[in-house]
Amino acid sequence: MGGRPDEDKAHGKPVKYDPSFRGPIKNRGCTDVICCILFLIFILGYIVVGIVAWVYGDPRQVLYPRNSTGAYCGMGENKDKPYLLYFNIFSCILTTNIIIAAEGNLQCPTPQVCVSSCPADPWTVGPSQYSQTVGEVFYAANRNFCLPGVPWDMPVLDSLKQELCPSFLLPSTPALGRCFPWSNSTTPELQGITGNISQGISGLLDALNARDISVKIFEDFARSWYWILIALGVALVVSLLFILLLRLVAGPLVLVLILGVLGVLAYGIYHCWKEYQVLRDKGASIAQLGFTTNLSAYQSVQETWLAAMIVLAVLEGILLLMLIFLRQRIRIAIALLKEASKAVGKMMSTMFYPLVTFVLLLICVAYWAMTALYLATSGQPQYVWWIPNASLPSCEEVPVNKSCDPMAQPVNSSCPGLMCVFQGYLTTGLVQRSIFNLQIYGVLGLFWTLNWVLALGQCVLAGAFASYYWAFHKPRDIPTFPLSSAFIRTLHYHTGSLAFGALILTLVQIARVVLEYIDHKLRGAQNPMARCIMCCFKCCLWCLEKFIKFLNHNAYIMIAIYGKNFCVSAKNAFMLLMRNIVRVVVLDKVTDLLLLFGKLLVVGGVGVLSFFFFSGRIQGLGKDFENPHLNYYWLPIMTSILGAYVIASGFFSVFGMCVDTLFLCFLEDLERNDGSLERPYYMSKALLQILGKKNEVPPGVKKKK
């Protein structure tokens, strides 16, 4: 008893009664103005970065292929020629790999030309055609595959030596804007070409088989999209019904879940005991096994199962003791869950607020992605001389890797294979030299805006649910538009506080990203001690991030109620929770257990139904409900499961925010009021009965103001 004052001093003083308090304070002022100004300046800078990226960037370099002269296929003078043809596509296979080719915009050390259509038939230049002209062999036969500007009367042999025209053609199909050989065609015998062509084509198609797969995926979505929407609709209805029905089944459901956990632990103890008995009778001991790095070998010794049985027995005993001594607090947690279900039922608009958050998050991600793409493609393309074999005597004087003009003819035509190829984009100029810094600014903007949008959603929902709790006569005293009022109030007064909390979280997340990057770069050169230190650092930052999220979450609730700045709200929320730490732990675990069951129910149910439907295991539904014929039946199943998880997470995040808000209001209600006529409790009758308290205000009579 005597230690109570010291405890109050350590965790702050209880909230005092305020006769003017009627729920979320309406007469409030702007908070964290300095951080608000900094955030707005940062956003303006972010917009400037986007404008600079838009002015100097050119995403066509990624979206459209380029020919050997640097011109885009499908645009400008090549508007009617959307596809890119490689003269010798095997040079792409022999000189590089698919990863390097993708990073270089699929550029290969062979001439490339924009064409209106890919070759449909195999063809090769015969020895008898060497003396003919380009016009007779190519243009007259409608083979418009030479580089632009090759004259009609040029001898074919000269055009082949200078690689102005292709020496062979393969039946190809467009993929990623480029002509690639058919996967189901028979490779022709081509004169003058060595190597295993079939193997080359097979290797290339194995690496770039995106077209066939993408077409099949598109067909599957086209055939099953309405069934996927029905599955998502089922997930939405089940999630909503689960939350609304918690007011009726929260108690029995929590009891069943707790008994289920006890039953699983009891079965684990029984299983460990049976395994221990079998191994004990065999005499399998750890002394015989000794020390080994093969962890699976420890399953065959009796000490492993004995230790596991002891651990499970201890957990079972702790859980039983908690149920015995914390049963009152578990009842309070169940009553709060029921009250949260009622609050959501009274304010159904809150269940769909995650759509607003989703749209804002989508805008933030899309803006960052476009800005990063434009920044990455800023700068002019750079071309350099390239030869396949620099050791030839005729190629010794060639300025390899020196800049060149792709429109000009080779300086030394006696060197075979000499060509001007694309190398990259120039990094000269102020913008190009600052691309890395601008990309870092963009990443910081991405994290900060995303965290701010999430903070906005939490604060808005907290304001709406707090107005429900502090309404003495429910639902009569609930504001008409609690969600929209909370949204306007939060944007008007607390943009700076939300930006402050989001910035703290952003800095920790950026530190984690940097640490992960360093760990990835140095993974091969690390010794065991360095890996241990790096793992400790990552663990500490992970714990710090979790703590800051917890602190911010409760700080936003206090901001929504009282309108104070971030630091004061975070301190008050933390002290209030520390004064009721046991209730916090019990409510948190009961809520987590319930929401986990809800997610498993929604996602598992939709997943099972989708599996049985799309795999054709449900018979007799009639033609209108017949499962579509699919290439990959698992694709709509996974899409339905992922969509159901997103929907369930959105609904249950609102419910979790409601529980946390009502819980903080409940704790303050206990400290602020005493049930007298002047200071009545705002909590529900169920909570009053559990706590053994009552209000002196008679039923149906308004509280004294």
Image (spheres, helix red, strand yellow):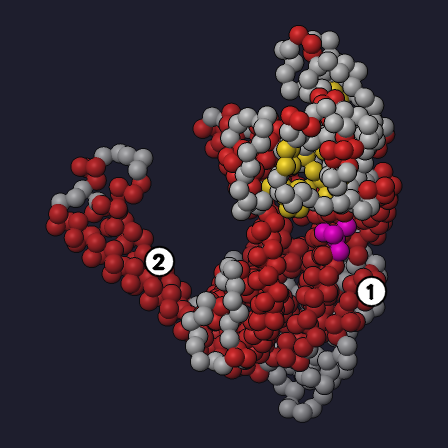
Residue 274 drawn at (x, y percent):
20, 57
Distance of mark 1 from mark 2, alpha carbons? 48 Å
- Find residue 427 and report its image quarter: top right
Residue at image x 79%, y 71%?
485
Q: Is residue 605 visible?
A: no
Residue at image x 26%, y 41%?
297
The kind of secondary structure element at disc 1 is loop
Q: Is residue 309 magenta?
A: no
Label 2 Cα neighbours within 10 Å, binned few <14 / some 14-19 / many ≥20: some
Q: Which residue is mark 1?
A: 28
* Chief secondary structure of the magenta portion: helix
Q: Nearer the viewer, residue 298 or 704?
A: 298
Disc nearest the viewer among 1 and 2: 2
In the depicted structure, whether residue 407 falls above or below residue 554: above
Residue at image x 70%, y 53%?
451
Residue 665 drawn at (x, y percent):
64, 69
For the C terminus, the image quarter is bottom right
Q: Which mark is residue 315?
A: 2
Left or right placement of residue 536 versus residue 259 in this view:
right
In the depicted structure, whether residue 183 falls above or below residue 134: below
Tags 1 and 2 in contact by the CB under 8 Å rule?
Answer: no
Q: Is residue 364 magenta?
A: yes
- Find residue 56 and report its image quarter: top right
Residue 202 drawn at (x, y percent):
52, 39
- Find residue 21 and report its image quarter: bottom right
Disc 1 residue type?
Arg
Left or right placement of residue 554 versus residue 329 in this view:
right
Q: Nearer the viewer, residue 13 or 35?
A: 35
Label 1 or label 2, whichever comes before in sequence order:
1
Q: Magenta region: which residues?
A: 363-367
Residue 675 drawn at (x, y percent):
62, 80
